[in-house]
Amino acid sequence: MTAERLVVIGGDAAGMSAASQARRLKGPEELSVVAFERGHFSSYSACGIPYWVSGDVAERDDLIARSPEEHRARDIDLRMRTEVTEIDVAGQRVRALDRESGETYWTGFDKLVIATGARPVRPALPGMDAAGVHGVQTLDDGQALLNSLDRAPGRRAVVVGAGYIGVEMAEALLKHGFQVTVLNRGEQPMATLDPDMGRLVHDAMDGLGITTVNRAEVTKILTGADGRVTAVATDDASHPADVVVLGIGVEPETTLARAAGLPVGPHGGLLTDLSMRVVGHDNIWAGGDCVEVLDLVAGRTRHIALGTHANKHGQIIGANVGGGYGTFPGVVGTAVSKVCDLEIARTGLREKDAHAVGLRFVTATIESTGRAGYFPGAQLMTVKMLAEYRTGRLLGVQIVGRDGAAKRVDIAAVALTAGMTVEQMTVLDLGYAPPFSPVWDPVLVAARKAVTAVRRAGTA
Amino acid sequence: MTAERLVVIGGDAAGMSAASQARRLKGPEELSVVAFERGHFSSYSACGIPYWVSGDVAERDDLIARSPEEHRARDIDLRMRTEVTEIDVAGQRVRALDRESGETYWTGFDKLVIATGARPVRPALPGMDAAGVHGVQTLDDGQALLNSLDRAPGRRAVVVGAGYIGVEMAEALLKHGFQVTVLNRGEQPMATLDPDMGRLVHDAMDGLGITTVNRAEVTKILTGADGRVTAVATDDASHPADVVVLGIGVEPETTLARAAGLPVGPHGGLLTDLSMRVVGHDNIWAGGDCVEVLDLVAGRTRHIALGTHANKHGQIIGANVGGGYGTFPGVVGTAVSKVCDLEIARTGLREKDAHAVGLRFVTATIESTGRAGYFPGAQLMTVKMLAEYRTGRLLGVQIVGRDGAAKRVDIAAVALTAGMTVEQMTVLDLGYAPPFSPVWDPVLVAARKAVTAVRRAGTA
């Protein structure tokens, strides 16, 4: 019996988790595993790049979970700097281009995993390719940015975009002594929050000395005689810049998959079933930043580029490819971040998400502290909760604060997964001791207020 | 129409929350509220006493959530230093003793709330009443201990008991410059954990310079000529002591209720229904440290003295007394604590609890970090998980570690409440960003290992 061949496209979280898990379940005599990665690095934490740029994480290699050599030592034929340029679904083969030698070749597969990730959104504006303009998607990007910071003629930085990457990069640049301006297209920074909660982030960024310009539409990158960036123009202003960081977001990298006729969803990501198999294809799986996932609260697919999902997808794909079993039911949309000591968290639906899917809801917003109010170091946090009209089912939670604010969102993430009502949440048995929580945890306080809002709305 | 009369016995968390909530729902023309408190203080955080003794919390009054005057300003007739000495259930009246004047009188009630709290366990050993021997149950106890620390002839302290109060007091005494010995009856400190997890607490206490003596049965308190404690004797040793703190635990204070013929359970606490009404009595409620609560995982009642439950009980009783509605379904047994920077958390069942109720289970223990491993400040935490044999239902979680270990137990507390399996937990959408979690949260890592353990056990 010859071994089955598994081909993996993409050597990062989803792809290599799938490869590793499949390898754990089946030895080389049963399964051969070939993985293609077009870049220089395998299995690294893209989410860690802002913290490497900031200097919090000392070395680039700290972000690499497993090197190509380590993968190879586990009998995974990982081919670096090799790009898959075509998927022949019917012929069960992929065409690879060795970017070092320029050589092209076809490789057959019995099973295929597509883990091509996401690519940064880069608007087609004049000057986007100027020296000093940087994305922060890959380790190469991070290194280029670090080099650029050293060479920057002055200390003015402009960050385009005020989402997770944008605010994290604002912090990183601040730590390098830059004067930082964040240009934000939306009403408030952190568009993953409702504007009233984003406002709190804005205020905190002000307090840190970060200038945030809202409703700013970038029109042009201005450059000097040397071709290096000098300023970023918006529709109504010009912001001097010695370095520009693009943190506008990402979209699924599905060029290959589309060309091969595989199904993509409304957000451009591959569509899979619960076992992470590409819809309509028994021997092709996909996971990580290139797929859409089911939002369990909204009942729709979304695109979320996040390492924790990519790792879960990979693990589940590997189990299924390797003869085990696993499913990915979906997400509730949890995300946490920080800018300096301000913690930002969300899960479930924002107001506009709920509107968009036809859910009627009430909101409740409260202020409390992460520790007992009398305990030293207790600091304010704001919790906003959305609950469905009439049923009182939890729909979403947003938290902005310090001192243990971010991970408190996990309480709501589990409650959302379980379909709890806010009334059920008011009696959750959460950990209480003065150094860790007030006697009513802030999430419980928000739930109590939401119960009252549901009741009032029901009698209105 | 004359107002109904609500009588509340006990002026702390459960009693005054009930009184306040009832008052919020009904004005004085509908409901008169009389509350009796035998001590000097109302509505204070007993859980905060160790942190006041340690000096973390500066002032005693910081622990008082609401003073008697504040309660009275809200139309609650709170009578301090007044002890209820008898409940006449049939006659719907209580007898009160004014401890200042010595006067005794009867007060009638339409509705009664019993919130008599818990009393510390004090074994009847020689010398227990010596000078320098202190409980830490009340604010008066805390003040007496603080005075005693100033007067202590030396700097050797013995803490009897290694539960929450014991380890918290060990930390407090350490901060006062005492050499601290903890005498522990059990196999390891923190008997609310399994011994393998308690061992980690023991090791950390060693590292902090706290001496822990396990399997130590105190036989006698030794005193000097001046009547002050000099040492604590156990069955096989004598431990010199300039001050002794008793942290042996508490039991429900139900003397009054028993004398009145009200039903108590196997742990000595009052038995209530879901609305917190005393079983068999339509007009009597009870809550807080004097009741037993349903353990939703074990399917049995337990006694848990914890401010967060007392506040919930009070709120629910107040709602029901005031014409609203609320129920307390039970607890899953969540508790968090710390000794210096070591965080300790548990929820659900320990191994012996599961055995005791006839549950067969598997365990999984993992080590991980609270942040991404490469993130500065990442420190180890150990997570132990119990899952039911065959079904894989989560039964309990214990966490010992630093840096965000304690409140992670809330994830498990919600999952227990929802009756999730460990397999369901592996795909929970928990907050991930390098400063807050590895890409696989430690709870997810434990769940994955537990899934494997369940599967293996099932095929054995």
Image (tube, coloured by chain):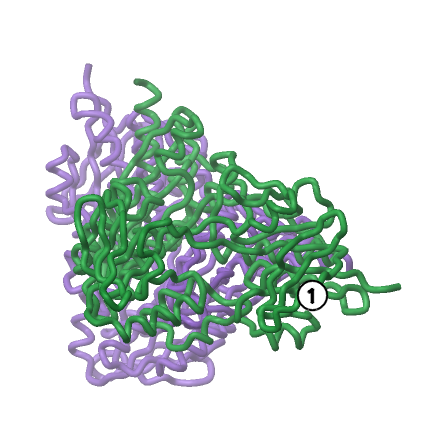
Chain colours: A purple, B green
Residue at point 25%, 71% (across, down): B152
**Residue B436 position (above or below residue B99):** above
Q: Determine the chain carrying the residue at label 1.
A: B
Res A15 seen here: yes
| Nearer to me, A408 or B31 | B31
**Residue B403 position (above or below residue B388):** below
Res A219 seen here: no
| Nearer to me, B27 or A101 | B27
| Nearer to me, A456 or B304 | B304
Residue at point 65%, 62% (across, down): B96
Q: Is residue A49 left or right of residue B298?
A: left
| Nearer to me, B224 or A247 | B224
Which quadrant holds the N terminus of chain A? top left
Badge count: 1
Q: Is residue B370 left or right of residue B140?
A: left
Q: Is residue B390 left or right of residue B203?
A: right
Give the residue type that dot 1 points to: Val
Outermost residue toward the top in this view? A1
Displayed quadrant of residue B23 = bottom right
The residue carrying mark 1 is: B34
**Residue A315 position (above or below residue A168):** above
Picture coordinates of residue B217, whole percent (x, y): 26, 45
Displayed quadrant of residue B130 = bottom left
